[in-house]
Amino acid sequence: MRRAGSVVRREELLGAVWGYSGGEETRTVDVHIRALRLKLGEAGRMIKTVRGVGYMAEK
């Protein structure tokens, strides 16, 4: 949420959260974002997918 309004690339999330160094093809981020949206309920709509890039939280 500190970067609300800015797109965070999937690769950045993979590195920062799970320690991936790059080059790996994984759906880890997508699966976790989906779970997070479900847990947040209505507030989960604040997390937007930027197709082909990553995710962003609306301000």
Image (cartoon, rainbow, N blue to C red):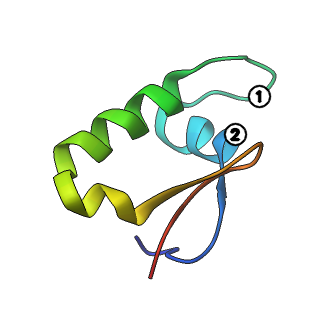
Determine whether label 1 and label 2 are within 8 Å by CB.
yes
Residue lying farthest to the bottom in this orientation: 59
* C-alpha distance separating marks 1 and 2: 7 Å
Q: Residue at x 65, y 41 (%)?
A: 10
Mark 2 — residue?
11
> What is the number of callouts on the image?
2
Which quadrant holds the N terminus? bottom left
Mark 1 secondary-structure assignment: loop
Residue that appears at 56% across and 77% down: 5
Q: Give the image location of residue 21, x and y in percent.
A: 72, 29
Question: Label 1 neighbourhood size at 10 Å, few (<14), some (14-19), many (20+)?
Answer: few
Residue 47 image offset from top left, x and y in percent:
43, 58
In the rendered view, does 49 fall on the left or right side of 43? right
Q: Amino acid at mark 2?
A: Glu
- Mark identifier at residue 51: none
Kindly state the secondary structure of the residue where label 2 is placed: helix
Q: Position of residue 51 (x, y in %)?
A: 71, 46
Between 44 and 15, the residue placed more toward the observer is 44
Residue bearing mark 1: 22
Image: 48 above or below 27: below
Residue visible at 63% across and 27% down?
A: 20
Residue 38 shown left or right of residue 14 in the figure: left
Amino acid type shown at disc 1 = Gly
